[in-house]
Image (cartoon, helix red, strand yellow):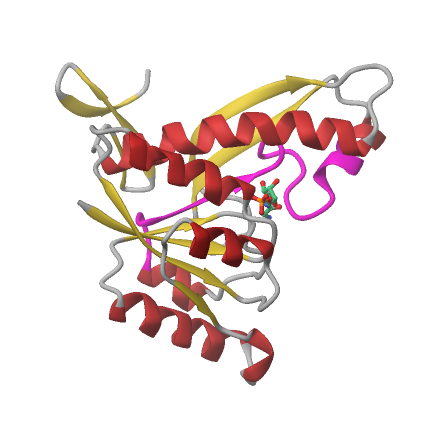
């Protein structure tokens, strides 16, 4: 089974929904570690209650981004992690770190990429007046929110939407989409090869056409 680390900075609702995959007997992953850069991340407590080992690494204790990332990397290796899942991890990762985990690290982003990279996606979607919003699961590359897309879910923007209720409808879809994507990866029905996402069809991995 693939040993998975989930990286969080806050609430951890995506992490919790991923942990439900443990109830699926055909899920080929093992949640080995939850790592947070924030001591007070609510998700750390949730993970402990779920019986998952947790680690807190304070990014403020390091002189620069890469030395923090090197400490995280060492921790991941110590736990024999095969695959990294970013779930509301709100630190930009160094190119060095991303290269160590190339093809073995995914992120969920609360917009239909390539629209609205970065933060405040729901506010910006409302400001732009888009009628369709959503979320994206993608492989992580050094450029922020720019990696190859694995899956997306669309959510309509309703006439009276506020940032809060749009965010909460998108979040519901995130929980479903992220678990589906992680299961596909762990069960080898999707992978990254030569910068392209390949999906299993007729027993072989190939590019969608
Ligand atoms: C989620 O909406 C996730 O898509 C977003 O943060 C939230 C975390 O919630 N991630 C990003 O914005 C990444 N740049 P959660 O802690 O409850 O999963």
In this picture, residue 21 sits left or right of residue 3: right
Look at the image and tell me in which quarter the C terminus lies. Answer: top left
* On screen, residue 110 above or below 67: above
Q: Tell me the quadrant of ligand 1.
A: top right
Q: Which residues are magenta?
A: 101-125
Predominant secondary structure in magenta?
loop
* On screen, residue 34 above or below 194: below
Residue 197 shows in the view: no
* On screen, residue 144 above or below 136: below
In this picture, residue 67 sits left or right of residue 21: right
Name the residue at the left extreme.
Answer: 203
Q: Where residue 25 appears, x then y in whole percent?
A: 21, 29
| Badge count | 0
Look at the image and tell me in which quarter the N terminus lies. Answer: top left
Residue 202 shows in the view: yes
Residue shown at 61% from the left, 36% from the top? 110
Residue shown at 34% from the left, 71% from the top? 75
Residue shown at 40% from the left, 70% from the top? 72
Q: Where residue 18 appears, x then y in whole percent?
A: 41, 38
- Picture quarter containing residue 92? bottom right
In this picture, residue 89 sits left or right of residue 157: left
Q: Where residue 205 appears, x then y in whole percent?
A: 19, 26
- Picture quarter containing residue 199? top left
From the viewer's side, name the closer residue of 57 and 196: 57
Q: Where residue 128 appears, x then y in whole percent?
A: 81, 29
- Picture quarter containing residue 172? top right
Residue shown at 58% from the left, 66% from the top? 38
27 falls in the magenta region: no
120 falls in the magenta region: yes
């Amino acid at each position: 089974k693939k040993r998975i680390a989930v990286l969080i900075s806050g609430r951890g609702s995506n992490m919790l929904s991923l942990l439900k995959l443990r109830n699926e007997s055909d899920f080929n992953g093992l949640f080995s570690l939850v790592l947070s850069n924030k001591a007070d991340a609510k998700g750390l407590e949730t993970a402990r209650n779920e019986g998952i080992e947790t680690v807190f690494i304070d990014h403020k204790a390091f002189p620069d981004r890469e030395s923090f990332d090197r400490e995280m990397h060492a921790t991941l290796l110590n736990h024999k992690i095969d695959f990294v899942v970013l779930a509301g991890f709100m630190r930009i990762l160094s190119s060095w770190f991303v290269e160590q985990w190339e093809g073995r690290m995914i992120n969920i982003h609360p917009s239909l990429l390539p629209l609205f990279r970065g933060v405040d996606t729901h506010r910006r979607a409302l400001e732009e007046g888009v009628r369709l919003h959503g979320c994206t699961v993608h492989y992580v590359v050094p450029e922020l929110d720019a990696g190859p897309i694995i899956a997306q879910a669309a959510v309509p923007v309703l006439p009276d939407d506020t940032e809060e209720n749009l965010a909460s409808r998108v979040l519901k879809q995130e929980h479903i989409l992220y678990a589906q994507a992680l299961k596909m990866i762990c069960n080898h029905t999707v992978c990254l090869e030569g910068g392209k996402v390949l999906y299993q069809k007729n027993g072989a991995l190939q590019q969608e056409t």
